[in-house]
Image (cartoon, rainbow, N blue to C red):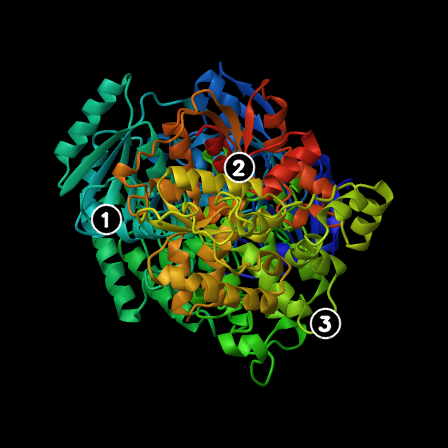
């Protein structure tokens, strides 16, 4: 085959699991570039008897897309949409096409593909065909099977054919017609009993009364019968005037009880949502991330459409009137409806932790029963969970009777509890005439339980069907027919604990003895991981594999994952890195955290922290990277750039002794190149210029106090101190002090105009950011300990602290708490630290009404605004956005990283990726700027990237405000 064939340990680690509980390490991962490549690979593997598993985005929750032998990644290259025909309302696609890409192609024709799973912005259509995906709108449009016209496939015997409808002889598959005729009664009584019966094979489509539709039967067979090379799909009209109704209920079973009545109104979707799931969003992203909702412990989200907004509103009000809800809200298309759908889309990740913070796992995450039985089924399931002492946050497609639920079954040691629970749950769903799976497929999670749901005769029939298509069991073995055990190949029990309270040993894992030095004083070897039971292993298993990091989230304001957007390689996405780290703590494939595969996987992580906020599971790869670097190099010689860039504040202070001479020297090209090369940096970069008058020197010399050193701010020589005004600590980080002093100088001007007394501590307080980003956590902790001594007294006395550089401010709001979780001063400093916009807009710290402060008029400002990644991730940009709007500025707000990301873009080997990341948003926006337009970026890195790559000088927001006072 022409595509890449990869046998490296790192690549096999990345593909050893999907979004399930299971881990099966392949021998080879192959990336075919065409359907001919796929056919050629399948032919060779069939002749050799090597198992093969086809894989799309790898978001399968049941272990459908992992397997031994060879994994074929069809998502990398097979991404062509061959045709969208508005006349026939069909589309012809390759299996690697992302579902949202098809939606974009169909949208100009007012068409769409009906099923829309929550992973639609990264899920491939081949994967959706594999497990018969549905999504919220299956109530209106049906399952994937209901929207497939024909399939181009290769079966396990090597036969390539087009599967379609209307051929009762099933000529392409000899023996199938006879098998159907011999089992008509069995198929009619056990298969296709209700809409979401996805478990097993959907043999009801082969019945003559159902059109003898081989294509629809092959949908949902999970790659066990055929490999899909292409598909012709039906499209449906895009609904007009979508309107969302949210109904509140005392609990989720009560919400489910109302579904049959509401279905009579032909809604487009009926989704259930546990109130505790919404609480997770509020805690993580603030109250503004959730619209005002009716009272209740559970909600139904019901979407309706109409020919006009008015008609849709009438239908919505009819639904409210027909319900037994305790409260209701109606949201037309707009921000509030978008927020609710975003919460629902992130359900799988959000539900990865219970309200108590315990890890929750899939397995019983996709059961379905006829909708009229859903309420009683949920009550019995709640009772079963209570008996086992486990918890979870239910949500799902209540209109179809399909419920998603991740449960905190203890998997750390073994799968024994999982096994017994799954058997009892299967018996329960069978009691209600339901299905083990409603859209995710059976995979490795549920295939063994099919005999609970089907008779022995039906199970035998499934085996006979498998034998017709794949007699040698080379296609996705261990799934559906001759299944692997439910508790076989579990990923989590094989992982070793890596407690943060224990010393670091060989391979970066658990050592012996006791903590020493600054780690002993803090009580933690590196980061404390307080939300993960003080265990790195628990932290890296936050990644549940839903793959939101593979999607381009920038249109929705997301920043994750910049390196993947640049390279499109699983190695460079948050999920891929998490998988390699999970393998490292397993230790059987990747040899510990110090292994070269780990360094390679983490190399292109920008440490932007976007995943910490954008990933619904709360993965913080920047923190994990820092921890791994700390464990890898503790007590060892480090790469030279760790000293050159990681100790930048030290070098800046030294340069401050003779900044003019240093700047002149570094402006000599051969000197600049030599310094960059010797410091492990890319010689295509420029060296930053050191301030000839650092801010703290400017302050000490009295430039802010009429040239008289030693005076308090606003105190005039020879006059009494002015009336007391609220104090604000202007914390000047190393970047602002030594590299960009105009920013804190502007802050003094703005704070004075806003009626504050500015306090600049006598002692420098470094946050240790560069030590953190290079994994020098002992050094970072020492600097933060000094910082707490300087800023702590102000914070505990209620004096706000203004941070200017977003990355440094984010350290005080996040990393500080993870390095000093038991120090009350850390909590106080984190709570007191604010951005300028937060300070000016938060009612607790905003200027007094009698201060005379008004936000300067920026109505003449048109600007490109680049929020810093760390601000987006930790503090958020809402306050800045609001302040700019109130000031009248016209802004284009970018989403995504600038690409420099502190030390990342400076390091040798990162330049090309740094530029590619900048091309995602920053550089195109700067090129499109009109004359006189501003570039606003609080991040020193963002401003540096803009000037070095596009020659555009940027300003911090505080500088723009100060210029107009």
Q: Is residue 69 visible?
A: no
Please name the residue shown 35% across and 49% down the image: 720
Extreme residue in the front direction: 718
Secondary structure at numbered mark 3: loop
- Tell me the mark number nearer the camera, choosing from 2 and 3: 2
Toward which corner of the image does residue 899 lie, by quadrant? top right
Q: Nearer the viewer, residue 236 or 152?
A: 236
Toward which corner of the image does residue 916 lie, by quadrant? top right
Please name the residue shown 70% across and 44% down the image: 688
Q: Nearer the viewer, residue 936 or 26?
A: 936
- Say which residue label 3 marks: 636
Which numbered disc covers residue 298?
A: 1
Q: Crowding near pointer 1: few (<14 within 10 Å), some, many (20+)?
A: many
Q: CA distance from mark 2 to mark 3?
A: 39 Å
- Point out residue 415 in the picture as x, y percentages from the top left corner: 46, 70
- Point out residue 859 in the picture as x, y percentages from the top left corner: 43, 21
Secondary structure at numbered mark 1: strand
- Name above or below for residue 447 compared with residue 777: above
- Name above or below for residue 33 compared with residue 469: above
- Say which residue label 2 marks: 956
- Tell me the mark number nearer the camera, choosing from 2 and 1: 2
Q: CA distance from mark 2 to mark 1?
A: 44 Å
Please name the residue shown 45% across and 66% down the image: 532
Quadrant the C terminus occupies: top left
Secondary structure at numbered mark 2: loop
Q: Is residue 21 visible?
A: yes
């Amino acid at each position: 085959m022409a595509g890449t064939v990869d046998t490296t340990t790192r690549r096999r680690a990345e593909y050893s699991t999907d979004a399930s509980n299971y881990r099966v390490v392949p021998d080879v991962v192959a990336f075919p570039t065409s359907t001919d490549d796929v056919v050629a690979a399948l032919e060779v593997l069939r002749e050799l008897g090597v198992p093969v598993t086809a894989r799309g985005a790898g978001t399968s929750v049941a272990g459908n897309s992992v397997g031994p032998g060879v994994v074929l990644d069809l998502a990398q290259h097979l991404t062509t949409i061959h045709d969208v025909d508005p006349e026939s309302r069909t589309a012809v696609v390759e299996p690697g096409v992302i579902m949202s890409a098809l939606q974009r192609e169909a949208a100009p024709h007012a068409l769409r593909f009906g099923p829309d799973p929550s992973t639609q912005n990264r899920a491939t259509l081949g994967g959706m065909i594999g497990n018969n995906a549905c999504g919220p709108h299956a109530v209106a449009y049906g399952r994937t099977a209901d929207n497939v016209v024909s399939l181009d496939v290769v079966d396990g015997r090597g036969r390539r054919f087009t599967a379609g409808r209307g051929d009762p002889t099933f000529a392409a598959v000899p023996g199938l017609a006879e098998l159907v005729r011999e089992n008509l009664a069995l198929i009619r009584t056990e298969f296709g009993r209700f809409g979401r019966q996805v478990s097993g094979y959907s043999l009801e489509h082969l019945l003559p009364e159902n059109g003898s539709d081989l294509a629809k039967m092959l949908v949902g067979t999970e790659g066990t019968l055929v490999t899909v090379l292409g598909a012709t799909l039906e499209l449906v009209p895009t609904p007009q005037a979508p309107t969302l109704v949210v109904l509140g209920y005392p609990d989720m079973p009560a919400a489910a009880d109302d579904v049959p009545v509401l279905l009579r109104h032909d809604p487009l979707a009926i989704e259930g949502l546990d109130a505790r799931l919404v609480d997770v969003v509020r805690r993580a992203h603030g109250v503004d991330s959730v619209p005002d909702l009716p009272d209740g412990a559970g909600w139904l989200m019901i979407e309706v459409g109409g020919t006009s907004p008015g008609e849709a509103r009438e239908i919505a009000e009819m639904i409210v009137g027909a319900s037994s809800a305790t409260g209701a809200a109606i949201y037309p298309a707009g921000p509030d409806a978008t927020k609710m759908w975003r919460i629902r889309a992130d359900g799988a990740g959000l539900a990865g932790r219970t309200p108590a913070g315990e890890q929750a796992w899939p397995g019983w995450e996709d059961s379905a029963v006829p909708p009229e039985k859903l309420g009683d089924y949920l009550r019995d399931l709640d009772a079963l969970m209570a008996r086992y002492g486990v918890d979870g946050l239910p949500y799902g497609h209540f209109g179809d009777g399909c419920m998603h639920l991740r449960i905190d079954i203890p998997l750390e040691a073994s799968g024994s509890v999982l096994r017994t629970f799954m058997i009892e749950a299967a018996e329960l769903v069978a009691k209600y005439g339901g299905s083990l799976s409603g859209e995710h497929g059976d995979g490795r999670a549920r295939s063994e339980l099919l005999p609970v749901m089907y008779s022995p005769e039906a199970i035998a029939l499934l085996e006979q069907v498998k034998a017709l298509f794949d007699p040698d069991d080379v296609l996705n073995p261990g799934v559906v027919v001759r299944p692997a055990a439910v508790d076989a190949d579990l990923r989590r029990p094989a992982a070793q604990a890596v407690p943060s309270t224990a010393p670091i040993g060989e391979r970066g894992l658990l050592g012996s003895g006791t903590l020493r030095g600054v780690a002993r004083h803090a009580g933690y070897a590196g980061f404390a991981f307080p939300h993960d039971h003080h265990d790195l292993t628990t932290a890296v298993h936050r990644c549940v594999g839903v793959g939101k990091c593979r999607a381009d989230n920038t249109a929705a304001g997301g920043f994750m994952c910049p390196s993947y957007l640049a390279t499109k390689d699983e190695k460079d996405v948050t999920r891929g890195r998490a998988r390699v780290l999970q393998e490292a703590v397993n230790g059987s494939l990747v040899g510990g955290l110090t292994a070269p595969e780990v360094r390679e996987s983490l190399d292109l992580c920008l440490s932007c922290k976007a995943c910490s906020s954008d990933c619904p599971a709360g993965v913080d790869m920047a923190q994990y990277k820092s921890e791994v670097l700390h464990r890898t190099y503790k007590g060892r010689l480090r790469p030279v750039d760790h000293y050159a860039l990681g100790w930048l504040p030290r070098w800046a202070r030294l340069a401050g002794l003779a900044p003019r001479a240093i700047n002149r020297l570094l402006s000599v090209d051969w000197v600049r190149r030599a310094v960059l090369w010797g410091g492990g940096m890319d010689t295509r970069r420029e060296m930053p210029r050191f301030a000839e008058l650092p801010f703290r020197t400017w302050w000490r010399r009295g430039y802010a106090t009429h040239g008289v050193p030693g005076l308090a701010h606003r105190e005039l020589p020879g006059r009494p101190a002015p009336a007391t005004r609220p104090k604000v600590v202007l914390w000047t980080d190393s970047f602002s002090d030594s590299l960009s002093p105009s920013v804190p100088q502007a802050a003094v001007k703005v704070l004075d105009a806003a009626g504050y007394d500015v306090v600049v501590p006598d002692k420098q307080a470094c946050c240790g950011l560069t030590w953190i980003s290079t994994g020098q956590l002992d050094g970072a902790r020492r600097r933060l300990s000094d910082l707490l001594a300087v800023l702590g007294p102000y914070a505990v006395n209620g004096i706000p602290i203004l941070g200017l550089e977003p990355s440094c401010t984010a350290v005080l709001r996040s990393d500080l708490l993870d390095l000093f979780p038991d120090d009350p001063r850390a909590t106080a400093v984190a709570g007191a630290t604010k951005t300028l916009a937060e300070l000016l807009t938060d009612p607790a710290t905003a200027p007094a009404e009698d201060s005379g402060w008004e936000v300067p008029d920026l109505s003449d400002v048109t600007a490109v605004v680049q929020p810093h990644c760390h601000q987006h991730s930790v503090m958020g940009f809402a306050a800045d956005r609001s302040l700019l709007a109130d000031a009248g500025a016209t802004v284009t707000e970018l989403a995504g990283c600038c690409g420099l990301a502190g030390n990342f873009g400076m390091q040798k080997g990162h330049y090309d990726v740094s530029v590619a990341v900048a091309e995602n948003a920053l550089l195109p926006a700067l090129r499109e700027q009109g004359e006189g337009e501003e570039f606003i970026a609080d991040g020193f890195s963002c401003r540096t990237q803009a000037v070095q790559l596009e020659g555009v000088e940027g300003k911090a927001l505080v500088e723009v405000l100060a210029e107009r006072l």
